[in-house]
Image (cartoon, rainbow, N blue to C red):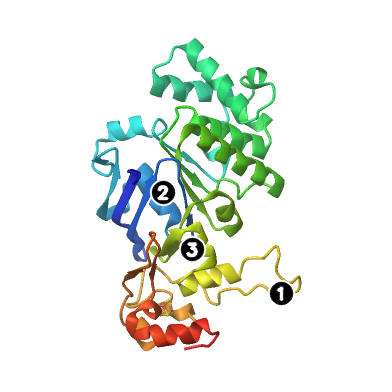
């Protein structure tokens, strides 16, 4: 059995806003193994990025509260280690790539200087060693004329090339975990594929565990071994990628899959959007959060939150249809009927 490189247990995170307390993350739980890619999917506002930023401890202190939970890395709860220790882990052992590369790059500094800064800080390398490693990383991510490009500024690179530089920066210290938050959303499709293939190849070389945050199920199928589906701050279904794509158990996952175009499906088959919009996480009602949008909603769903049901191999879903007492309803649903 693999020992997880990261384990998140019962994580609850809230924000204080003028309209009230936002329960952004509610009881999130998962593990990440060495060399594994876990995709976190869900609509905007489902808590994906907040979960990632909590792991990095990058959320604003003045209005954020980690209400409960632990994040275990290397035997320690990173929510409780000192700020100084977290700074030494960030970039060196746990790195993050954001959607927009310009949020990670300093427009006034050359690419080379920015790359070398991280390597010198975390690896205690001399200037010469850091330079050598920086050039090596730029070559590894496919930047042509790497030596010369060390002297260029971010604005002299295209969007795709900038994202490659950010990935080079994130992987320059061989982190054990890479968190990639929508790393290809801002890029055009051909560049997207190149960046994803690059991340996959680098992962195979380094054994880095990747948490990939995305709303694109095509990217998930290409990259991940494990998938967590988030809705209104909770993981509503989690499992191996084959389980989620071929044997999904939660109505929200069914909805996500039906709204995705299929390469080999009939050409005129319409995409079916999920009706309604995600709930307001400031005023969550009791019961299942998906109830107002769920075509299979039952009386019980509106009053009680469903417990997690497990199906072996780490496949889990939270839905009242999976409860023993609702099995008749589930068979009816599986046969194409409505409850
Ligand atoms: Fe739908 Fe009820 Fe399942 Fe929620 S618990 S997803 S409302 S069937």
SS class, disc 3: helix
Left or right of 3, for residue 190: right
Sequence-wise, which precedes: disc 1 or disc 2? 2
* C-alpha separation, residue under disc 1 versus residue under disc 2: 36 Å
The yes-or-no answer for disc 3 within 8 Å of ligand 1 is no
Measuring 41% from the left and 41% from the top, which residue is drawn there? 34
Can you give x and y, in whole percent of width and height, for residue 36 in the image? 45, 45
From the image, tell me which residue sits under label 3. Answer: 243
Judge the density around disc 3: few (<14), some (14-19), many (≥20) Cα neighbours within 10 Å.
some
Q: Is residue 220 above or below residue 75?
A: below
From the image, tell me which residue sits under label 1. Answer: 269
Left or right of 329, for residue 133: right
From the image, tell me which residue sits under label 2. Answer: 52
The residue nearer to you, when weighing 173 against 90, is 173
* Mark toward the viewer: 1 or 2: 1
Query: Which quadrant of the figure shows ligand 1?
Result: bottom left
The residue nearer to you, when weighing 17 against 261, is 261
* C-alpha separation, residue under disc 3 versus residue under disc 2: 24 Å
Judge the density around disc 2: few (<14), some (14-19), many (≥20) Cα neighbours within 10 Å.
many
Left or right of 58, for residue 156: right
Can you give x and y, in whole percent of width and height, for residue 272 in the image? 62, 75
Can you give x and y, in whole percent of width and height, for residue 242 in the image? 52, 60
SS class, disc 2: helix
The answer to whether residue 43 of the structure is visible from this angle is: no
* C-alpha separation, residue under disc 3 versus residue under disc 1: 24 Å
SS class, disc 1: loop
């Amino acid at each position: 059995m693999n020992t997880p490189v990261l384990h998140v247990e019962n994580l609850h995170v809230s924000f204080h806003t003028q309209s009230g307390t936002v329960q952004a993350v509610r009881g999130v739980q998962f593990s990440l193994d060495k060399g594994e890619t876990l995709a976190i999917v869900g609509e905007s506002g489902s808590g994906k990025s907040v979960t990632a930023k909590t792991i990095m401890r990058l959320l604003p202190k003045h209005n954020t509260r980690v209400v409960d939970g632990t994040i275990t890395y290397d035997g320690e709860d990173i929510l409780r280690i000192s700020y100084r220790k977290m700074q030494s882990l960030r970039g060196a052992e746990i790195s993050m790539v954001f959607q927009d590369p310009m949020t990670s790059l300093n427009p006034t500094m050359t690419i080379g200087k920015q790359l070398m800064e991280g390597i010198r800080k975390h690896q205690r390398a001399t200037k010469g060693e850091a330079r050598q490693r920086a050039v090596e990383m730029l070559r590894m991510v496919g930047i042509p004329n790497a030596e010369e490009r060390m002297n260029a500024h971010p604005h002299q690179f295209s969007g795709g090339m900038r994202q490659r530089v950010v990935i080079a920066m994130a992987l320059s210290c061989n982190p054990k975990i890479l968190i990639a938050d929508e790393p290809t959303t801002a890029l055009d499709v051909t560049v997207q594929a190149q960046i994803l293939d690059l991340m996959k190849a680098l992962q195979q070389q380094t054994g880095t565990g990747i948490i990939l945050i995305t709303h694109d199920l095509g990217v998930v199928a290409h990259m991940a071994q494990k998938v967590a589906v988030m809705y209104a701050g909770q993981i509503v279904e989690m499992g191996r990628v084959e389980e989620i794509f071929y044997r999904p158990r939660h109505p929200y996952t069914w909805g996500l899959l039906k709204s995705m175009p299929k390469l080999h499906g009939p050409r005129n088959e319409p995409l079916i959007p999920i009706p309604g919009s995600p709930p307001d996480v400031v005023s969550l009602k009791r019961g299942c959060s998906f109830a107002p949008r769920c075509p299979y909603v039952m009386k019980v769903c509106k009053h009680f939150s469903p417990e997690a049901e497990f199906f072996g191999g780490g496949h889990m879903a939270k839905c009242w249809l999976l409860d023993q007492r609702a099995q008749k309803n589930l068979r009816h649903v599986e046969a194409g009927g409505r409850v």
